[in-house]
Image (cartoon, rainbow, N blue to C red):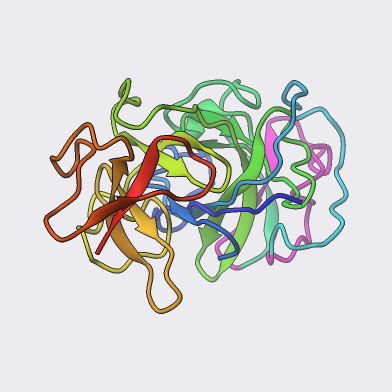
Amino acid sequence: MHARFVITASLGFFAFGTLVAACDGEVLQNGGVGGGSTSANTTISTGQGGSTSASTTSGGPVTCPNPNYTDVVEDECSLLDPDSCTEPGTGCVPQNDGTTGCVYGGGLKDVQATCTENIECKPGLVCAFGRCSQPCCRETDEPCGSGECNVEFGFGPNFVYYCSYLDTCTPFGEPCPTGQGCVPRYAEGDAICVGLQPDGGADGEACQFINDCQLNLVCDRDPLQDVCRYMCKTDMSSTTPGQGGCPVGQTCQTEGALTGIGICRP
């Protein structure tokens, strides 16, 4: 089993109704998941992923080895069974009272289709980081196909894990889509485009998730307190913080399996 990280975003409560508009390892906080008047919290953890094509909402029920994909009480319907809501035009969604319900609404887009708002996706799906997403198992990444089960949506005190389909990127290279930053995953040896928090931390400020920090900073793991630090170019081709260099009094130190990109530390 690979190390996993989690991404979270603050959105308030999901307003599913007539319209769906309404750390273990590295952890990442997402700056937004879908648009409209949606409100929920979201976290992402990375796992093994897969090489198969993405599953769709007609893929049948999924059984998780451990029931840690949600703490919502699935009374009216099952989040992992796309057929548990039999009325056409409905999907199984978490309710604000900590249970599930079959709710009308949503659009026509299936899993992994590009989106900007939850209302574009089929009932029961959400728009997570620009892709329609479904609930999933953390350990197996099912039924994410080519994605990873690493987006944790929070509904008040409750949570549900969903798939993500994140683009990889090169730090200090080609820019990510508007509103996203290129965040290194040092353990995995790559970097991903993901939304940054609008109030992200500055150098030396405390953090919890790997995208808790401002652009070109990372949440540096520390036994005492995780803090935001500049990522840097290990070949020292730049001396400017935010462009590959480090602040005065800090040095660029290698980290994990990501070649060429380190972390500025005192």
Q: Is residue 260 above or below residue 185?
A: above
Residue 70: image x %, image y %? 69, 61
Q: Viewed as shown, does residue 41 lie left or right of 226?
A: right
Q: Residue at x 38, y 39 (%)?
A: 261
- Return the residue nearer the eye: 42 or 216: 216
- Return the residue nearer the eye: 187 or 132: 187
Q: Is residue 238 visible?
A: yes
Outermost residue, bottom side: 224
Q: State the image quarter where residue 132 is shown.
A: top right
Residue 80: image x %, image y %? 78, 46
Does the stretch in magenta take in 76?
A: yes
Q: Is residue 43 above or below residue 266?
A: above
Q: Residue at x 30, y 24 (%)?
A: 175
Q: Is residue 94 visible?
A: no
Q: Residue at x 50, y 57 (%)?
A: 27
Tell me how many marks there are. 0
Q: Is residue 22 above or below residue 119?
A: below
Magenta-highlighted stretch: main secondary structure? loop
- Return the residue nearer the eye: 38 or 248: 248
Q: Which residues are magenta?
A: 71-97
Q: Viewed as shown, does residue 169 lie left or right of 64?
A: left
Q: Residue at x 59, y 66 (%)?
A: 158
Quadrant in the picture for the C terminus: bottom left
Does the stretch in magenta take in 92?
A: yes
Q: Viewed as shown, does residue 139 lie left or right of 5?
A: right
